[in-house]
Image (spheres, grey):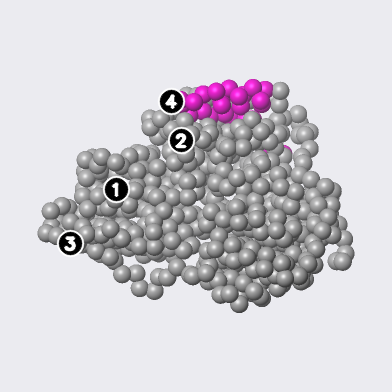
Amino acid sequence: MTATHLSSDPLADRATPAAPTRTGAQALVATLERIGVETIFGLPGGAVLPLYDALYHAEHLRHILVRHEQGAGHAAQGYAAATGKVGVCMATSGPGATNLVTPLADANMDSVPMVAITGNVASTAIGTDAFQEADIRSISMPVTKHSFFVTRADEVAATIASAFHLASSGRPGPVLVDITKDALVGAAAEGLVELPLPGYHVPPAPAPEAVRDAVELMLTARRPVLYVGGGCIRANAHHQVRALAELTGMPVVTTLMARGAFPDSHPQHMGMPGMHGTVSAVAALQKSDLIISLGARFDDRVTGAKDSFAPGATIVHADIDPAEIGKNFPTAVGLLGDARTTIDLLITEWTARTAAGAQPDHRTWMARCQGWKLAYPLGYDSPTDGALAPQYVIERLGMLAGPDAIFASGVGQHQMWASQFIRYDEPRRWLNSGGLGTMGYAVPAAMGAKVGMPDSTVWAVDGDGCFQMTNQELATCAVEGIPIKVAIINNAALGMVRQWQALFYSERFSASQLPSMQIPDFATLATAYGCVGLRCDSAADVDATIEQAMAVDDQPVVVDFRVSKDSMVWPMVPAGTSNDAIQHARDLTPDFGEDE
């Protein structure tokens, strides 16, 4: 596994600097070991070779050699998302560093704690267009929590320690540390000194008056909803979310990034809101008079057209990032602070107010929400062409893999079906690229998750388009003994693009259909990579094929599920339209009824 959570002072045991006795690269390796890092995903190159030479002598660091730097970044993300610790990846200068930009942007959008370490050309060559030179600090600055550029060996250790502190504290996110080659080979002092971080302060607990104001609104609301976002998983606040929900009796919706933060099986759970969310979740938000947002950011895929989102609702917005509060919608009460601390304070205040005589009753509202849930359940039609239904495959995969399995998804139709038809009752069982929507995320993220959680079954649920972007990491898994399982939902198309073209472009399927289910033959490709390759194209064989894959515990397994290309994701809110226009199926628009 990689790094443990850091205290507010990651250098609490720092020593007094002594005479130089080691290189910057050796200081970096020693700092990683001291922090608690155990695994690094990376790919070497000329500028970073001094660091790899130092790693050669490391006793407590496992380096996993990926086949592409993008795979290293997504593996670090998957590790971090599954474990809650800081993921670490490493690359050389120039193209090695720029290949990390997509994972960095992905981690930044989804608040994933990650440290990326890159080598660069010598400081004397900076700005000369030297071979494999790239200003990765400037390139990455917009898509990281912070980017460091280190040119002196004495700065290496403190910068690395500071990077881990930044990545893991406050709102988590990716931090890049770019180090010149002369800083890696230069002499560095023993011990650490604290690197000042001017202007960086982790928000304290919310103001008491803000907590009181929020609870006052919660007590007087007739139609409140707890809108739970991914911040509650990052803060390990799932127990607090459940306690608050059961205490207040309010309906709960969980975003795509928050699946598992509140149990799917709980009667108060209305499902996932948004473009492909459940009707009950969308209706609950639209008809609410109070939204209590906990670690969510009112993403456009959740709100639909902003001018018609929850028109009668007042908003209480709890977030650790002050930039998010009120960014997309006016906020009546802002609660700035860690989600777990904030929810604890709301519970304490609510308990005190109800003990003093306040008697809120949300049973009528809850019954109305549950009525929507019963009237408009998730479902699907069998394909008219007799082909395998992708929803059935994913539903059975969730059932047979069990509640403790981890699922890492690519992006597209299969991502939405995996979020809809697999039950998530615990956090950190669902990993996906939510904000950036990166095709190719699933396989390397599953690899990272399996390294971090070796005792868990880890499935990558991927589309045939996504899979072909990063499937080279199967070689990494085979060589390194990382037995992930991959379910390819193979419809011979870029499924979500094709769905939009069918619905909004008069079935003009421009550049969305992949040539053939036989090119490549995924089962044969898996075998070539040293994995077990399976294929399934019949509903009668789905369970047996999944069980066959589950029985393999010492090799990666790839299952090519041949599914219908015409299956679509429902419900759906067409992009840019009101959530009131959600379609439960292609020809069914639900009626939410009048406000009470």
Give percent across and percent down for residue 81: 50, 48
| Disc nearer the start of the sequence (2/3) | 3
Q: Which numbered dot is residue 17? A: 3
- Would you call the spot at circle 3 few (<14 residues within 10 Å), some (14-19), or many (20 or more)? few
Q: Which numbered dot is residue 420? A: none
Q: Mark 1 highlights which residue?
A: 33
Q: Mark 4 highlights which residue?
A: 530
Q: In the rendered image, which quarter is residue 332 located in?
A: bottom right
Give the tally of numbered discs.
Answer: 4
Q: Mark 2 highlights which residue?
A: 454
- Would you call the spot at circle 2 few (<14 residues within 10 Å), some (14-19), or many (20 or more)? some
| Disc nearer the start of the sequence (2/1) | 1
Give percent across and percent down for residue 141: 40, 64
**Tag in front: 1 or 4:** 1
Q: Range of the magenta residues?
A: 541-566
Q: Is residue 146 left or right of residue 185?
A: right
Report the residue at 21% width, 50% height from top. 26
Task: Find the distance from the CA under tag 2 to the CA under tag 4.
Answer: 19 Å
Q: Is residue 530 above or below residue 325?
A: above
| Disc nearer the start of the sequence (4/3) | 3
| SS at badge 1 | helix
Task: Find the distance from the CA under tag 2 to the CA under tag 1.
Answer: 20 Å
Q: Is residue 119 left or right of residue 171?
A: left
**Tag in front: 2 or 4:** 2
Give percent across and percent down for residue 314: 72, 72
